[in-house]
Amino acid sequence: MLNKKIRVGVLASNGSVGQRFVQLLADHPWFDLAVVSGSERRVGKKYGDTCKWLLPGGIPEKVREMVMVPSTPEALDVPLVFSALPKAIAVDQEPEFAKAGIAVCTNAGAYRREKDVPVLLPEVNPDHTALIKKQQANRGWGGFIVTNPNCTSTGTTIALRALDKSFTLDKVFAVSLQALSGAGYPGVPSMDIIDNVIPFISGEEEKFEWEPRKIMGTLTDSGVKMAEFKMSTHTNRVPVTDGHLVCLTVEVRNKPSSIEEVIRAMGEFKTPEISSGLPSTPSPVIKVMEDESRPQPRLDRMTGNGMSTVAGRIRTDPVLDMRLLVLSHNTIRGAAGGSIYNAELLVKQGFI
Amino acid sequence: MLNKKIRVGVLASNGSVGQRFVQLLADHPWFDLAVVSGSERRVGKKYGDTCKWLLPGGIPEKVREMVMVPSTPEALDVPLVFSALPKAIAVDQEPEFAKAGIAVCTNAGAYRREKDVPVLLPEVNPDHTALIKKQQANRGWGGFIVTNPNCTSTGTTIALRALDKSFTLDKVFAVSLQALSGAGYPGVPSMDIIDNVIPFISGEEEKFEWEPRKIMGTLTDSGVKMAEFKMSTHTNRVPVTDGHLVCLTVEVRNKPSSIEEVIRAMGEFKTPEISSGLPSTPSPVIKVMEDESRPQPRLDRMTGNGMSTVAGRIRTDPVLDMRLLVLSHNTIRGAAGGSIYNAELLVKQGFI
Amino acid sequence: MLNKKIRVGVLASNGSVGQRFVQLLADHPWFDLAVVSGSERRVGKKYGDTCKWLLPGGIPEKVREMVMVPSTPEALDVPLVFSALPKAIAVDQEPEFAKAGIAVCTNAGAYRREKDVPVLLPEVNPDHTALIKKQQANRGWGGFIVTNPNCTSTGTTIALRALDKSFTLDKVFAVSLQALSGAGYPGVPSMDIIDNVIPFISGEEEKFEWEPRKIMGTLTDSGVKMAEFKMSTHTNRVPVTDGHLVCLTVEVRNKPSSIEEVIRAMGEFKTPEISSGLPSTPSPVIKVMEDESRPQPRLDRMTGNGMSTVAGRIRTDPVLDMRLLVLSHNTIRGAAGGSIYNAELLVKQGFI
Amino acid sequence: MLNKKIRVGVLASNGSVGQRFVQLLADHPWFDLAVVSGSERRVGKKYGDTCKWLLPGGIPEKVREMVMVPSTPEALDVPLVFSALPKAIAVDQEPEFAKAGIAVCTNAGAYRREKDVPVLLPEVNPDHTALIKKQQANRGWGGFIVTNPNCTSTGTTIALRALDKSFTLDKVFAVSLQALSGAGYPGVPSMDIIDNVIPFISGEEEKFEWEPRKIMGTLTDSGVKMAEFKMSTHTNRVPVTDGHLVCLTVEVRNKPSSIEEVIRAMGEFKTPEISSGLPSTPSPVIKVMEDESRPQPRLDRMTGNGMSTVAGRIRTDPVLDMRLLVLSHNTIRGAAGGSIYNAELLVKQGFI
């Protein structure tokens, strides 16, 4: 599609999400991973010498020899950066890139709650990129910041969008069983999680109850009007490496005639035209499993190369309307892969 | 309290729950573990030679040398048996003991749904033992069958009873993270659960949505009138050896003035007078933890020797009235220990 | 290389190793997976309906619809079968295929100790296939049986062969940390292995101390003369899904001048010419890792698509000559993949 | 035995080993846990408010309210301190206590290699406490430092001592499977160990090949003459919370007449008279298990309240003389419990 690959960089390329960016960008058809940045003590070293690589398969050859640069617009010198910065650092550094005319696709949560910053899921709200113009005008930036949602919100929001489209959501109860990679590295100490689960993740429930409603909200002149359904969550950490599983119980306004109608609505859900056919467009968008014991993280997280949302056990509920399971790969679809899919959409829309 | 210990036997004493019975009865102040039974191929062998013991600490010395007998009233020849039989066998064998005048305290689910059989939790419904007279009359039995609930229902029902007493339950959403020992032995294959969770347990949600309402139901002339609150569940298996954790979201009829009132109601919940002061009465009945990351299975399952119900993260909910966590040791409180506590209550009430 | 793919079948295609055969053969360049067999209760059913598939990625599409046949030469009707039969059944069934003129490449251990049956590793003893003629003459078979070693022996023997070639082995001490998939399915109960290791695997040490010496033995008129080095092992089961790790301590007859010479000998080890360039030839044959904490099962088991032997921590020893680690994927290189590599060699050698 | 309990303090009382000290000293018959110290940021806070308690069972009541003091002799003001300090801090702080006339029983490795400092195991070398006089003379200290061995060395050295006493050790090959708690807290990141083992522990093999030979060495005028047997090790980290398992292969000088003689020598091994009958004396000293799949960490680590050494699979070896397994609880016997046992011995010997 492109005449020439777009040169891109990764901020905080050594962490858990940074490594996924590096892995997924190493052979990307549109983007040329040209530069990797990291904290001061790594600058000037070869990526392969300073990175404790955590993923099966090893460091991509072309990245192993790259010399790390500081996280400044001048040092990276590319039109597009992917950010895996921690929130506390992202809050200051990401605007520097946007000011310098650079597009920032970030996994950090620092700007998700800003009125003029989209929390973007190409399957759900590709129109929210219209906020970019507003953002640039408000802030006097030549570049911009686009965020992807928290890893737990991602798969759930895609599944909820499929339900909302057909039946209009009213109330959602969600309980997550979240993977360890979601806590970064070193993250959760092993002594805390062997033969155990941890029924608390700091700040997670607040994000999980807020983000889906912004993403599914309506664009207005003053920003995004939050969607009106209500959401209640519990979030748990479980001893699983990758893949967040969520138990959903849902009430809708337009009652389905049967559970088969719900299953069909999930399975036939399509990504909007503008978001389809991109290199990272998931195929299928939502996979509905029939086996009543699925999806399971270890077996199903790599569905559609880790980009698909996987649903299962879609069934009636004795109190509300329906129950189901949703699984999503948290460091691919819910982080680096999601951010790259966003960037592809932005290229198609002409923002990059 | 007793002049002389009551001689008791354990049916299916070699399995996961059977071993807990043996462990807890080996030094019981009221009961003398006199005889252990098992399947045909074990009969005539020493317990220590035929049992693959699964619990830390080893087989109690006095039981190691006991010679296993067949599961018949004649072979056991005791006034009280504890049953760890699988449901499919319990359905035929347990009545044989009741006919023979023997009290059967069972962990099996075979008779839980019978109108004249109590599903007994001493903290909740000690009055339901009144069904025993009806059961004996209906069936012409000299003995009787008393069941304890499914392991998942146990802790949750005790916690719900504390809420119901103060605020009257209306709707309950429960999502469990259940331990492996709940599936017995060999139970869950390791290849299914390492780096994984399994979001389905056959038949579990049906039990979990029905049992709490029977236990909290009202005695009437025709049996137990089910409690009226509604209940919706998801049940999941997680890689934890012991301890079922449940995430609860609850709506009540009588609104608490504050969340502190709810915390107080849980912490101050007392077992009924008749059920207190017994050897297995939990102390505390409900432990409310303050640390927002607790209870956790590995750290908290042995609270009150594994008999207490542990609650935590009692907080408001954006959709219903309150959210909380409940942890209960599934093979102690939720199985063998619960059944022994039931037997102690029956002794106190004069049924044994 | 071939004008036409060779039609092949898989015996016991539903088990842990059988599924790996199906996965690896679904798109094989030389072999056409034409038929799958299984136990009586599965015959006549579609593979996808009767198989509890355990591998990430799901059942290959073309196999899902295949109708299962009984394990007889007539029902399979192919020139080559791969056997994942349990030993007790293999002992009777595999000869039936050989009698019927069919080549049997088997993962079962039933015939490994027969004088006229090769235990074949293409990297080590491709010349041992000369036993096939003897086997056919002795037994009056038109077909034949070729075995691959036990999963634990596989990687270790390849690594030992590299050492033996350069330095001539004298004594080997090996301690394994073995993955769960090596025990098949359902295999190890989860309650036995969570927060635990099991320092015993029935029959494993006997195999592990015998097979490497047969594989590295010399062909003589009366069969294979066992290699003369001595071997002592401990075998342990650990909570890892795939990948057997072995700690080796080795004494040799021709002392290396330095540890670097040993590292070089391992890294430069080549598969014999006849075994190179086949579809399953590992690349690299042996990967030597420099990071002192590697190889690790989760990170390194898929090296060379799970076919490479991975070595690390090659270092001197205070008592003998050298110490090192060896990792090998137990259900790919150590089972199905190894058996397929054997079949490829047999095709090249003209036996099939 | 004592008229009055001895007041003691714990240095670095908040860490993984520090908590074990607190747990084991809370009800000790001879020692009164009077004071707990920690790093600067904790000083002045209540123990229960600043400690992230990691052990099942919760913080002992009497310690919960203790106010933490700095790690100085003046602030602790007791005749005996137990040290869980990290090595880098212990090297400077522990001598301060010794100078001030205080007995230091330490789990830190900082002084284990000093000629005048005993590495003490009451079962093995109670006579090595004679070094204390030399230490005090050399250094002008009124107090002294006594160390316990590294957690991996502990159980293995006790088992080796039993073999050495009867058969005189010549060569020892040891491969460990070590628990996570041995790495302290936060220690091993969960992402590194789920579905994995790590075949490297920094500095561990050096300790494990040196300490047993010092402990089993002979007192001479110039210090301890190292025992002469040779030792070679591999050390591995496995996903187990507590309990180090070691696979041993051993050559001896005085050959046993049969393996039964070895089993008997292990099972009948007695702690020296001076070390017996103390509050922490293990009972049994060595437990020899008959089941060929034992010892296992989860099932057997608490043998003798976590103070016994557990052996199993004592069998002949095809290369050397014998093979066996040894299990020892790494934070009880191998750390805090061992240090307390040492202090009890020192009281009995009149050093405290």
Image: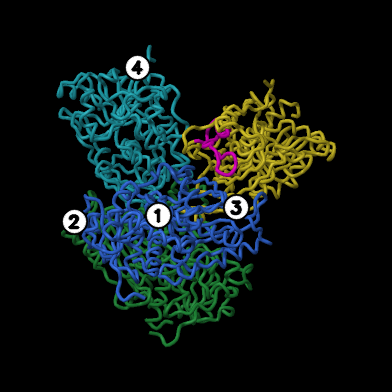
Chain colours: A blue, B yellow, C green, D cyan
In terms of secondary structure, where does tag 2 sit? loop
Q: Amino acid at mark 4?
A: Ile
Q: Amino acid at mark 2?
A: Gly
Q: Residues within 10 Å of mark 1 (few under 14, many from 20)?
A: many
Query: Hey, what amino acid is under mark 1?
Result: Asp
The chain holding disc 2 is A
The Cα atoms of the two marked residues, 2 and 1, are separated by: 36 Å
Query: Alpha-carbon neighbours of circle 3 within 10 Å: few (<14), some, or many (≥20)?
Result: some
Report the residue marked by disc 2: A44
Q: Nearer the viewer, residue C109 or B236?
A: B236
Q: Which residue is mark 1?
A: A116
Q: Residue furthest top?
A: D3
> Dot 3 corresponds to which residue?
A170
SS under mark 4: strand
Location of residue D187 by image quarter:
top left
Element marked by disc 1: loop
Let me know if residue A244 is in the magenta part: no
